[in-house]
Image (tube, grey):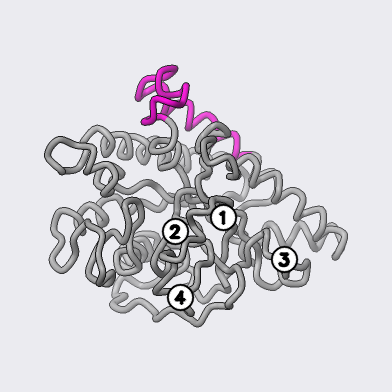
Amino acid sequence: MLATITSSPKALLARTCRDFGNGLPNGRFCNGRTVADIIGDEMGLPRPPAYLDQSLTEDVILKNGVNFASGGGGILNETGSLFIQRFSLYKQIELFQGTQDLIREKIRSKEADNFFQQARYIVALGSNDFINNYLMPVYSDSWTYNDKSFIQYLMDTLRAQLILLHSLGARELMLFGLGPMGCIPLQRVLSTDGQCQDKTNQLALAFNKATSELVVDLANNLPNASYTFGDAYDVVNDVITNPGNFASTLCSDRSKYVFWDEYHPSDSANQLIAKEIIIKVGFLKPNLTDIASPPTPATGPSSDDDGHMEITLRS
């Protein structure tokens, strides 16, 4: 299983996950699968259970990994503070350190070190730092920084976090970039003409450029680091601007739309995004034509975050 924790109650509303498995809410900010779900399925990886899953044990972690994602969290500790219950990336790393202690008690330290160094890690975050922080005047970051200095603040913080993860054993890691945030329905309704907010999209592009450069730098300088940047901005933008059978609106037939609510892409859109990332990164050969059908999930709290904030350990 690929799973996540979410500390924001919005992800447990009845309308979430309605097209996933049994249709019951499980914490995903999506009507079905997220991008991480689909990529994991295509790689043949199990879906790691959520850190707060009450059935989680050391044996389950050793077999399937574990997911620390938290709805509403961000790179910065202050991001999403209005949600109250959310874990920033630093908090997630702290929980990961606690998990390492448990595994070392279960198996010998040398085997534990090998386990964590051979695991695959996913970090998908950043949009909350803009949508639920910098672009909201209720947060002090919105008047403390300008666009350039805020992105630098994010990069300085993210660099420290990724170096910390490396010191904890993360050797193979993928970091997802941002999509065109200015085109989510919530941003479009704030514009005077209902179109995408160019300023917000420019922030996403600047974040992606800085993050890509950061990932390359760390991959070149951290010992044995295989760090990859997953950029799907263009494919998401193409789907929005050349929709075909898609449209960025709330909908009853969610399979024909890019967004299923005011924030989050639909399962159908996520399939297109995941396919593009798979091809770009080289998980599969470029002649990939079909995405696997979603497997039957567990009925318990097996969930994935909206993509805004995720660190996943996979063995």
Residue 223 x %, y %: 63, 45
For marks 1 and 4, give the one nearer the viewer: 4
Q: Pointer 1 and pointer 4: residues touching (CB < 8 Å)?
A: no
User: Is 39 located above or below residue 249 in the figure?
Assistant: below
Question: Pointer 1: what residue?
Answer: 6
Question: Pointer 3: what residue?
Answer: 54
Q: Is residue 78 left or right of residue 287?
A: right
User: Is 40 located above or below residue 203 in the figure?
Assistant: below
Q: Which residues are magenta?
A: 134-163
Residue 219 x %, y %: 52, 45
Q: Amino acid at mark 1?
A: Thr
Q: Residues within 10 Å of mark 4 (few under 14, many from 20)?
A: some
**Residue in the picture at 53% in, 78% down:** 297
Q: N-terminal of the two: label 2 or label 4?
A: 4
Q: Pointer 2 and pointer 4: residues touching (CB < 8 Å)?
A: no
Instruction: Kindly tell me whether residue 193 is visible in this rendering.
Output: yes
Q: N-terminal of the two: label 3 or label 1?
A: 1
Find numbered disc 1 in the image and state the secondary structure of the residue it sits on.
Answer: loop
